[in-house]
Image: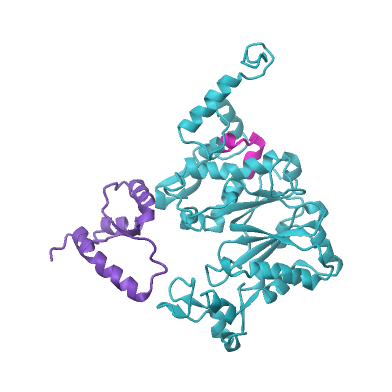
Amino acid sequence: MADGILLERGGIPAVSICTEPFKIPADAMARAYGFPGFQYLLTPHPVASLTLVEVRERVVQMTPRILEILGVEE
Amino acid sequence: MTTTGVPVGSDGGGVPDPAAVQDAIEYCYERGWTDGLPVVPCDQALLDRFLAQTDRGPDDVVFAMPHLNRHCTVRLAALNAAMAGCRPEYFPVVLAAWDSLAAEGYLAKGIWQSTTGTAPMLVVNGPVRERIGLNSRGNVFGPGFRANATIGRALRLTALNAFGLRPRELDQATQGTPAKYTLCVAENEEESPWAPLPAEYGFAAGESTVTAMTIRSVVHVEARHTGVPEQLLRDFADTVARTGALLHETISACLVLSPEHAHLLAGAGWDKPRIREFVHGAAVRSRAGLDRVGKGSVSRKSRWRVPADHPDAVPDREAEIDPDSTVGDGRVHVLRSPETVLVVVAGASNSGVSAVVETFGPRGDSPCVVPVPGG
């Protein structure tokens, strides 16, 4: 979250991605950085133990929302 | 008067009114200032007694976490030490603990927010132990001693109240560890056969110090069975080398030896460098054993252990320097060097029970020994 917020503040569009159990800490970090409305993407847990194929599937699932947060119109 | 009929408070006997104390404790709970246990209500007079224990100014920064936009001043550290139950004379030890943690470096990297759920362990040496009643002997990791219990707790309350590191919010620990409540031990210098920990790193005998270490677990080693140094040290090494501890490519450890184990080793002519060397050599896993638990390789970027078929997997450092280690029965060292093992003596001189404290990170540098002002 911190990296995403700092990139955005540096003028670089960014999307932070968290797994669902990290929603509360993610919101807390956004508040700590004075950016409570920071938009980020939640994805199901876990990610660390996914296979390469599953990681690719997850990216495909997330891509529309990533583009939406970035403000990209398809 | 109370409902028990015991005269208190206004009788001039100096006994506080339980109802008022209970109200103050509940007041602190309601504001979220506790670790789950009651805290000591602190007023300006008590805070001033803490602040009088240091030459530092109340607004001096003890530690900053820029990634959280928060910092802890001497005043906040004192306030939380008071709430933790410290006596004012403990405060120089608390401040030295903060300095040691800052020097260690993991705090600034956000380790207290990590899912791993680490805690700081404080090792105190020198005359301050006796002066403030720190326990170095029986039940050294357990309850019963105000200084041990409250100095460690002062750090935790500060983490909660000054840095906002509350569980399930900014503290993302999956399970945490009981050591997060408090973990402060004194070295049993009087019953150790060797010079104390700080003496290995240039500190004079008679100087009081605090050495903080970020740790994950305290693992007991039951070894009442042998008088053979090599057998005893292999028992420690086997505990050090458990695969569950292997998050990173290698690990590190602090051996907290009971006086009985320390004397067994010293009596056979073993000093700390020789112990470190032996444990480093004996703390190994077979390549096949690592592969069995899916930790036979490391991730290219993070260097965390991963299965050999992981997309990011690359050979570990051992495989690069010793081709023999890549075969099934090849030996993989879990410690990078002998210097990744620290040796401390603590506990009662009554049995062959010691502990392997699993310190966080690969390490190998000198521990962060910080003097306590006033000696």
Left or right: B14 in relation to B168 = right
In the displayed image of the protein, which residue is found farthest to the top? B11
Q: Quadrant where the N terminus of chain B lies? A: top right
Q: Quadrant of residue B337?
A: bottom right
To which quarter of the image does residue A45 belong? bottom left
Mark count: 0
Q: Does residue B61 appear in this view?
A: no
Q: Quadrant of the C terminus of chain B?
A: top right
Depth check, front residue: B247 or A12? B247
Horizontal and vertical percent position of residue B61 = 49, 44
* Residue B52 as seen in the image, left or right of residue B114: right
- Asked if residue B335 lies in the magenta stretch, the reply is no
Say above or below: B115 vs B57: below
Residue occupying the point 54% across, 72% down? B249
Left or right placement of residue B351 versus residue B33 in this view: right
Magenta span: predominant SS is: helix
Colour in which the image shows chain B: cyan
The residue drawn where x is 23% and y is 62% is A66
Instruction: Identify the colour of chain A in the image.
Output: purple
Q: Position of residue B2 (x, y in %)?
A: 62, 15
Residue pictured at 48% horizontal, 40% vertical: B161
Which quadrant of the figure has residue B220? bottom right
Residue B282: give x, y in percent of width and height: 69, 75
Picture coordinates of residue B117 (x, y %)? 52, 55
**In the rendered image, is residue B254 in sight?**
yes
Q: Nearer the viewer, residue B191 or B218?
A: B218
Direction from residue B160 to residue B130 in the image, left or right:
right
The image shows residue B253, relative to residue B290, as above or below, that is above
> Going by the picture, which residue comes out furthest to the right?
B267
Magenta stretch: residue B87 in it? yes
Q: Which residues are magenta?
A: B81-93
